[in-house]
Image (spheres, helix red, strand yellow):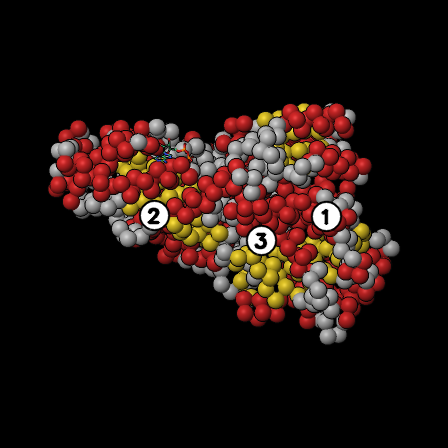
Amino acid sequence: MENAKKELTLQPGKKRRIGVMTSGGDAPGMNGAVRAVVRMSIARGCESYAICEGYEGLVKGGDLIKQMFWEDVRGWISEGGTLIGTARCAEFRERPGRLKGAKNLILKGIDALIICGGDGSLTGADIFRTEWPGLLKELVDTGELTAEQIESHKHLNIVGLVGSIDNDMSMTDATIGAYSSLTRICQAVDFIDSTAFSHSRAFVIEVMGRHCGWLALMASISTGADFVFIPEKPPSEGWHDEMCEIVAEHRRLGKRKTIVIVAEGAIDRELNKITPGMVKDLLANRLGLDTRITTLGHVQRGGSACAYDRMLSTLQGVKAVEAVLAATPETPSYVISIIENKITKKPLMEAVKLTQAVATAIAAKDFDKAISLRDAEFLEYFNCYRTTTMTAKPCLRLPENKRMRIAIVHIGAPAGGMNSATRAAAAYCLTRGHRPFAIHNGFPGLCRHHADSISSVRELSWIEVDGWVSKGGSEIGTNRTLPSEDIGKTAWCFEHYKFDALFVIGGFEAFTSVSELRKARDKYPAFRIPMVVLPATVSNNVPGTEFSIGSDTCLNALIDYCDAIRQSASASRRRVFVVETQGGRSGYVATIAGLSIGAFAVYTPEEGINIGMLARDIDRIRESFANDHGQGRAGKLILRNERASKTYTTEIIANMIREEAKGRFESRFAIPGHVQQGGSPSPMDRVRAVRLAVKCMQFLEQEGQMETAVIGIKGSKVVFSPMEEVERDETDWAERRPKLEFWMGLRDVADTLSGRFRPVPVTEPPAEPGLYDCM
Ligand code: ADP
């Protein structure tokens, strides 16, 4: 075996060797990135090597740089932390340490490196790359390596992936791990919330973020905290008074609990630290509140990655392999980023410099610059938070003649985040002086009102909506029925309540409802008001957007369910589970959940199911079980969308697999059903609901606005698309989904990474010395 290893290192084959490393602080999702890099490297005909323990492994070499095989990363996507280890390495900061690193890479024949870490790790990688030719020259000059050994490795290509729970890197909206950490924080605050309510207490909660307030700000938006302290935007000089006024106002309105979130690095405008203790003393002494401090600590790093991080790390890992293979000595080092919904590559050192400029701007007390250097989303979220929290500020009111009566209605099935959006819209209205009216139970609720004289249209107050931020379902009630059921009565009600604008939250029916109202404008003047749809549905099938509120909650519910099933499958080896997902006639949920759990196959309505496909998949499963030599404990999962086929039901597919397995493996089916609507909405759904709802309100209040539109995330942008255009150009009415579904391209990635369309993988190193090199 030793011989074999030596042969392997000294005689690199023709295959390109790509190294992957995790470095700096660990973050949920790093394992997903490593899995994607390993498998995509192999799928692209390269060999994959893990550099264990961060730069420590690079400097020490030997067994810390080890070849990775397809099966080595099986099940990694569901694991927290980083399984290849991480460490801080002082030696790598100095040239002699990097010299050792270069030698170790050459010995293994590696000249392409993908590093998942924070800005420190990525800076180190860029320095390493720049120094590489000089390091090799020195190694040859000193006789540590021969000229032949370095001959085909003259350039080092590196690509960065940002793994950091703080979300502290510029030029990307999200870093791998940030949303998982936010999920942990929100769970904790939601728990604290109930005890705070019971005792009418105040809690000051410290969250991580020494230089970046993203976690603190997003947690405050997601949980409806009363006040937040972040380093990039310190509060104004009189913050003691301001915080106490806001908390006192919320108490005066009837709120029984107070939550203040403090980032670890919170400071005032003079750069003095603002500590949880200081905030506690103020709340206790000035307002007389029974106040406790909770420091969340390392809980924030722990646990399995949330759906978004699994998808992000997987897709970014794939992109990183592409980028490292495409790199040339002339191209800059890249970091893989995401802007809204688009994964892209950016010049690494530019991103690092911008990130470091934030700290410089803070130190220079230039806070406007500090926040502007974060991504554009950050300031927008900050402003959303302020306008939905400071409803009592008279300076934010519009003049009387610009104030409107805005109707809010939920249409279709409930989806996580509908309540968060309603709360944000109502709070924004109150801040600006508009009057928010909830239409209860959809359009039938509105029309029935005059029949049974129970008012289904009620003005929303701040205290009524405040607690809705973390609630699943629909507090104002939702209904699928379209306004065309009684369009005349609907128009009469619009006129009766003098609605000046309409905000519709829901799925495909919400979209269809606004389409009907728009078309009825000629006949009914009551509908000649601005209207906007905020897509909210687990199915994510609304035209005009790539993201619907509620779909992230659904994905998280589904991956939790599938992780539990996988656990059961790993106890009884060689089991295939067929899980039925929701999604209507859109395969989005099935595909993205499949990508996030590493499902073997995904069956969608877009593609359908046929006998050839099933036969091929069963053959692949059979081969895969035959090849794993009893090593692969985790069972296989297949996701089938509820409408993928009328004939091949979930149960039938499970039965067919069992029949064909002939006792060599087992099969079961499972249908999570409405579990997929989720309990409490995910933080991503909550924060996006708030941001998009506030944008919708701003759209409605624009001077002379008469448009009907749908708000959506398209690629790297948030856009309002006119209904008429979306109805005509983007909607597949028969199939109730967008004509072009952005995620269709991801199916190939999912199939490649799951091994569904791949030759039988080499699963293990050889048992006999030397054998490996002959293969
Ligand atoms: P993060 O990557 O999370 O920002 P650190 O800043 O601690 O974490 O960096 C992790 C490791 O990256 C360090 O221990 C060191 O080995 C390497 N590193 C960081 N900065 C540099 C640098 N300027 N030059 C060389 N290596 C560096």
Q: Earlier in the sequence, mark 3 or mark 1?
A: 1
Q: Is residue 541 visible?
A: no
Image position of 495 (left or right of 354): right
Marks 3, 2: nearer the viewer: 2
Image position of 64 (left or right of 9): right
In the structure shown, which secondary structural element does the residue marked by tag 1 occupy?
helix
In the structure shown, which secondary structural element does the residue marked by tag 2 occupy?
loop
Q: For the residue marked with disc 1, what is the amino acid?
A: Ala
Q: CA distance from mark 3 to mark 1?
A: 21 Å
Quarter of the rendered image showing ligand 1: top left
**In the rendered image, which residue does mark 1 sit on?**
427
**In the rendered image, which residue does mark 2 sit on?**
333
Q: For the residue marked with disc 3, what is the amino acid?
A: Ser
Q: CA distance from mark 1 to mark 2?
A: 45 Å
Marks 1, 2: nearer the viewer: 2
| Quadrant location of the C terminus in the rendered image | top left
Question: Residue placed at 49% from the left, 60% from the top?
Answer: 741
180 above or below 446? above
In the structure shown, which secondary structural element does the residue marked by tag 3 occupy?
loop
| Numbered tag placed on residue 548 in the rendering | 3
303 above or below 583? above
Image position of 266 (left or right of 128): right
Q: CA distance from mark 3 to mark 2?
A: 34 Å
